Amino acid sequence: MRKTRTEAKEHNRRALLAAARLIVARDGHRAKLEEIAEQAGLTTGAVYSLFGSKNGLLIALVTDYLTPHYGGIEQTVPDGMGLVEAVEVFARHYRSLCDDPDALRHLSFEISLQDLALRDPELAPRLAASVRAHEERLTALLSGRVHDGSAVTPRQAQRLATALRALMVGLSQGVTLGLADAASGDYFAATARALITPDVLGPP
């Protein structure tokens, strides 16, 4: 059956994102727009039509990559769970992602994106804004949870979310690279739990 215009547009969008992810993971900052379009079976004109620019495609790529990741985290941490338990569940989920057969390829992709951002002054703030938006989702997930008889404020949740994300990224990279083979889910949970201190949370 022939695709509608909307369906064709979404098909092309997904094809370009998939192609960009492959090319960026392989070539890093040397990734060429022409090759991405060719891999997707499209022209560079389709990139500009759908994303506005190569950087627009890369930002969409980050959002496309991170959204399912944080969506999965939100599903594992239900409402009503206390802060400590929520943080432990979050950490164990992060550790489980290291066992994905494609974990090394995912890490290569992440590093390639960071390399691109370092080399492109226009891309860097847009990439940072996209990552920050997903960190805000983690902040919202932690905000209001009970700890020591009080609800965690948005300000406290934001401070904890920043520390948690940095810790989990570092630990998971170590596991994926084979530098922290003994870092089990229990270890991830324990190190994450250790962040829940007055110094990290700060004042309400």
Image (cartoon, rainbow, N blue to C red):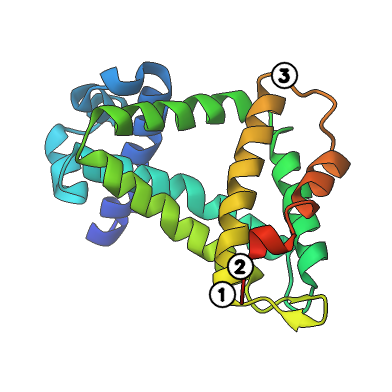
Q: Quadrant of residue 158?
A: bottom right
Residue furthest to the right in view is: 186
**Mark closest to the chain's N terminus, 1 or 3:** 1
Whether pointer 2 and pointer 1 mark residues with C-beta atoms closer than 8 Å, the reply is yes
- The numbered disc on residue 16 is none
Residue beneath label 3, please? 179
Q: Secondary structure at mark 1?
A: helix
For residue 116, above or below residue 63: above
Q: Residues within 10 Å of mark 3 (few under 14, many from 20)?
A: few
Instruction: Classify residue 204 as left or right of residue 188.
Output: left
Residue appearing at x 85%, y 35% in the figure = 184
Residue beneath label 2, please? 157
Mark 1 to mark 3: distance in Å?
34 Å
Residue beneath label 1, please? 154
Tell me the amino acid under the disc marked 1: Pro
The front one of 110 and 163 is 163
x and y percentages locating residue 28 in the rendered image: 35, 21
x and y percentages locating residue 200 in the rendered image: 65, 58
